Amino acid sequence: MAENLDPGARAAAEQKARKAARDAARQQEPAEDRKGKEIVPPWEKDATGISLVDTHAHIDGEDFDGDREEMLSRAEKAGVVAVVTFGDTMESSARVVKLTSSHENVFAGVGVHPENAFPFTQADEDRLAAWTKEKNIVAIGEIGLDYYWEKDEEKRKLQRKMFVRQLALARDLDLPVCIHDREAHGDLMTILKTEGRKNRGVIHCFSGSWEMAKELLKLGWYIGVDGPLTYKNAAKLPEIVQNMPADRLLVETDCPYLSPLPYRGKRNEPAYVRITAECAANIRGESLADFAAQTTKNACEIYELNL
Ligand code: NI
C-alpha cells in the first residue's frame, strides 16, 4: 500500500481490500448440489401466522443498491416483520441512520466493527452517541473482536481498545450491544466478565461451544444463529440450538454474507432468515410459527422494538 496516503485514505483502502477478500471468500463457498430439488423461495411460501425478525443484517451497502426496496418487500412476503441492520464503519453507521429514518420496520445499531478498528476519537464517540437519538436506532453494534481476519498483535490490541470503549458508550447510553466474535473466544469472555459485566445484548453469529454458550447465558447474553446452521458442516451449532433456552435465542442472516442452503455462495438477504428459522424449529421440534413468535418476542425484548 502506498506510504504517502493520509490515514483516512489508507483506512478506506484497507477497508476496500478487506471487502474484496470477503467477497472472494463468499464466491468460493461451495454451492449446494441442486440436482433434482425444487427450490421455492421463502417469499413464495405461505406466511400466514409467521412473524420473524432478522436481528442482524447489513443492508446499507452497495450489494443492495440495485434492489433495496424489492429486497425489503420480499422479506415482508416471507413473514419478516422487521430487520435490524448494523453499521460496521462510521460511514455505514451514517447510512443505517438514513435508512431507519425512511423505513418503519427497519431498526439499526451504530458502531465500528473490529475489522475496521481505527484510533477512535472523542468526536467519533460523540457522533455515535448523537445517532442513537435518531428514529429506530436501538443498539451499539456491530462491535467486537475478529482474530480470524486480523493476525497482527498491535491491531488486535486496537480492536480490544475500541471494543471496550464502545461497550462503555453503550452502558452510558443504556443500550444493548451486538457483538461479533470470530476466533477470539478467550479474550471476548475475559472482557465480558470484566469491563463488559454490566452490558447487555447479543453475541451474534455464534461460533463457540455449548460450554461457552452456557457461560454467556449465565452472564445474561442472547445468542444469534445464522445460515451456517443449515450447512452440512454446522458442527456444534445444531446441538446449541437444541439446548438453548427458548427465551435467549435469535435468528439472523448477517446478509449479504452467510447465505443458508440452498443459496450458499450467493448474496444473502433478510427473507432467507426464514430458512434458518425453519431449520432451527425442526431441530427443536417446534412449529415454524411458534419458533418465529418466540424469537420475535426475544428480539423485541433485547432491542426494545415497538412492533
Ligand atoms: Ni455482521
Image: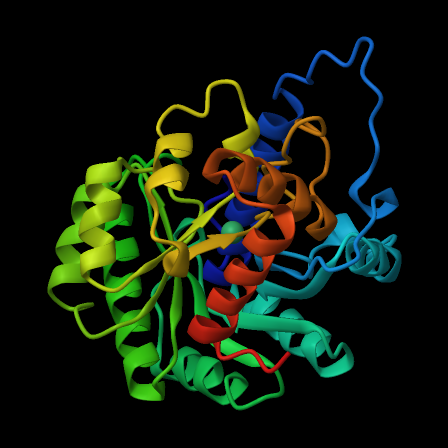
Name the residue located 59 percent from the left edge and 88 percent from the top edge: 134
Q: Which one is in front, 105 or 165?
A: 105
Q: Is residue 279 above or below residue 46?
A: above
Is the C terminus in the top left, top right, bottom left or bottom right quadrant?
bottom right
Name the residue located 13 percent from the left edge and 61 percent from the top edge: 193
Q: Which one is in front, 130 or 283?
A: 283
Taking the image as drawn, is residue 220 in sight? yes
Residue 110 point in image, percent of width and height: 50, 71
Residue 46 point in image, percent of width and height: 83, 48
Taking the image as drawn, is residue 143 in sight? no
Give left or right: position of 19 versus 206: right
Residue 96 point in image, percent of width and height: 64, 70
Name the residue located 30 percent from the left edge and 36 percent from the top edge: 183
Give left or right: position of 172 versus 30: left
Q: Which one is in front, 93 or 242?
A: 242
Q: Which one is in front, 106 or 38?
A: 38
Residue 173 point in image, percent of width and height: 36, 87
Please tell me how many numbered marks the rendered image carries.
0
